[in-house]
């Protein structure tokens, strides 16, 4: 709770015109195939409520004029992955889950997992399937820079890294922020 309060306070002081969120705002831990998900600890409704409350507080802190962009992460995609196991309910889950997350009512423009925002030639994305266990965080940054052929930023791998490339024609860099 202290970390969330610090983020809200910073956003309120900063009052940006645009805010880019890199995903995993909604954990959906109770639907996780990993770890010891304990449905009795908290349920999906509690998780949706907490994520929506955070976005509402963030919206209040930055004001209505700020454009908020959210690239959905692998945690939010747990809902569509669960639905893909039962195709008949995939679209139902995706539609209602997005509605319950409150993006439209809070004025949050969102992009599906794997999607990205191209802001003046700078790519902003959650990050993709690249694993630091396979490649290491520096190599993930390099792979992202090569994939998008651009400078950019991503998260997802829970480590920080920056890689750059320069030539007489152009320079680019990719930043992994956690």
Image (cartoon, rainbow, N blue to C red):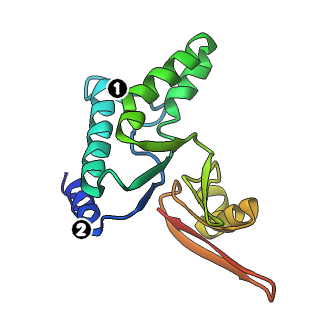
Q: Residue at x 41, y 37 (%)?
A: 103
**Residue 22 in sight here:** yes
Residue position marked by numbered label 1 in the rendering: 44
Q: Residue at x 43, y 60 (%)?
A: 18
Q: Is residue 129 above or below residue 159?
A: above
Residue 13 has which mark?
2
Please say if the residues under marks 1 and 2 sit with CB atoms less than 8 Å apart: no
Residue lying at the far bottom in this picture: please name it.
168
- Front residue of this view, candidates 150 and 145: 150
Q: Is residue 140 left or right of residue 47?
A: right
Q: Secondary structure at mark 1?
A: helix
Image quadrant of residue 138? bottom right
- Percent x, y of residue 170: 76, 81
- Front residue of this view, candidates 139 and 115: 115
Q: Residue at x 45, y 21 (%)?
A: 96
Q: Is residue 54 above or below residue 31?
A: below
Residue lying at the far top in this picture: please name it.
88
């Amino acid at each position: 709770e202290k970390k969330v309060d610090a983020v809200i306070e910073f956003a309120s002081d900063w009052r940006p015109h645009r805010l880019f969120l890199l995903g995993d705002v909604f954990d959906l831990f109770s639907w996780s195939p990993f770890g010891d998900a304990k449905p009795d600890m908290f349920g999906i409704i509690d998780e949706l409520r907490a994520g929506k409350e955070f976005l509402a507080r963030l919206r209040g802190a930055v004001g209505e004029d700020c454009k908020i962009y959210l690239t959905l992460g692998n945690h939010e995609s747990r809902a569509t992955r669960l639905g893909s196991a039962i195709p008949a309910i995939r679209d139902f889950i995706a539609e209602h889950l997005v509605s319950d997350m409150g993006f439209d009512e809070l004025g949050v423009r969102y992009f599906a997992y794997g999607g990205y925002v191209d802001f003046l030639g700078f790519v902003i994305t959650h990050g993709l399937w690249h694993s630091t266990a396979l490649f290491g965080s520096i190599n993930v940054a390099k792979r992202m820079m090569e994939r998008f052929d651009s400078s950019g930023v991503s998260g997802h791998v829970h480590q920080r890294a920056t890689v750059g490339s320069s030539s007489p024609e152009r320079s680019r860099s990719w930043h992994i922020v956690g």
